[in-house]
Every structure is written in structure tokens, then in C-alpha cells.
Amino acid sequence: IFYTLVHPTSPSFQTVSSIKPNTGFVTKDNRVWRYLDTPGHWSPQKLVATVLTGSNSSIDRIVLVLDSTQPVSKSVDFLYGLLQHFQSTTSKSKKPSVLVACHKSKSPKAKNVRRLKLQVRNELERLGKLMMAAENAAASTVNWDDVLSSQVGFISTSVDPPMLDDLKAYLESGTLPE
């Protein structure tokens, strides 16, 4: 997805998993968009520390690409870290929105968006309980359904250009899809 967004006129080519972050810039309508592709093997803490600190602290839109053919737990670890970071460091009006792009949606093994959203919510609840138990605190009072409906959107994607229209619309407007 990263290369398709940053180099929309380039021919398609095979990519590999990132080992280090990639940054791309796109200028459109006198605005500069910065795209950051981070490695999937980083820990959630390292991703949050890298993505949301310093010059990156003014981020207002985040796309989390989730492989819809794989279990959601690794991606949800990162999402949980992001949402916890937003809860503790930003005012309610300045919290970035997060779009979960359920990628590889055309694969025969892909789960649909509704199923993935349910799995993400269940995993967020499980992580919340684990974190509370680790801190010997009371059970988490976070209503993940409310968080997902107000801060997080879900779409199906693939690298086919029409499948990226909702993603591009979100990146340009900041409006989460219904």
C-alpha cells in the first residue's frame, strides 16, 4: 500500500517486508502528505515511541494495515499501544483517528471486515484485562465498542486501485468511513 500511495504512477512491483522505516512525501493541492511505513517486527512500544514523539507528535491520521488472512493479535498490540498513548497524552478533541485497513481482502483466506472488527475488539478487551492484572489494578473501564466507533474505522483493501479509494478519501479528508 505504501508504494502505491507514494508512487501512484509507477508500475506495480513485488515488495518485501520493511526492515527499517520508509518515509514518502506526496504533494497535492499545495499540501504535503508524509507517509511513514514502519516494520511489522517492531514492538508496540518502539512503534509508539517512534511514531508519536518529537516531530511526529502532530499526527492526525494513522492507518494500521492488518493482514486479513492472519491472526489479529500482533496488529492489535500496536493499536492498543496507540489508543493507550492517546488516552494518556492528548486531549479528547486532538486525538488522531485510526483507520484499520484490512488488507489482502481479495484472498480466499481473508476474513471480512465485520469479523475482523469483532476480533480486534475482543483482543483489545483481552489486552486491557492483562494490563490491569499486571498492574494489580481494577478491571479496565474502557468501553472498546465506544472507542472503535469514535476513533477507529475499518475498510477492506487490496493493492487494486479501486480498493484504495476509501483509504485515499480518509487520508485526504480525515473522515472515518461509516
Image (cartoon, rainbow, N blue to C red):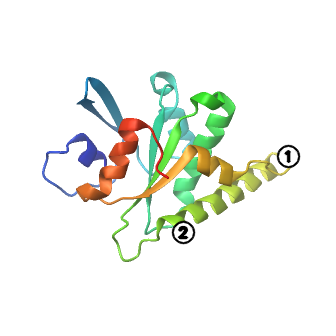
Residue 6 at x, y percent in the picture? 25, 40
- At label 2, counting other C-alpha atoms closer than 10 Å, the crowd grade (few under 14, some 14-19, many 20 or more) is few
Front-most of residues 150 and 6: 150
Q: Which numbered marker is on residue 115?
A: 2
For the image shown, how many numbered marks are present on the structure? 2
Front-most of residues 90 and 47: 90
Residue 93 at x, y percent in the picture? 61, 29
Q: Residue furthest bottom?
A: 108
- At label 1, counting other C-alpha atoms closer than 10 Å, the crowd grade (few under 14, some 14-19, many 20 or more) is few
Q: Which numbered marker is on residue 137?
A: 1
Residue 8 at x, y percent in the picture? 19, 45
Q: Residue furthest front?
A: 178
Give the CA separation, mark 2 to mark 1: 30 Å
Residue visible at 58% across and 43% down in the picture: 151
Residue 75 at x, y percent in the picture? 52, 55
Tags 2 and 1 touching, CB below 8 Å: no
| Amino acid type, mark 1 | Ala
Residue visible at 61% across and 42% down in the picture: 83
| Amino acid type, mark 2 | Arg
Residue visible at 51% across and 50% down in the picture: 153
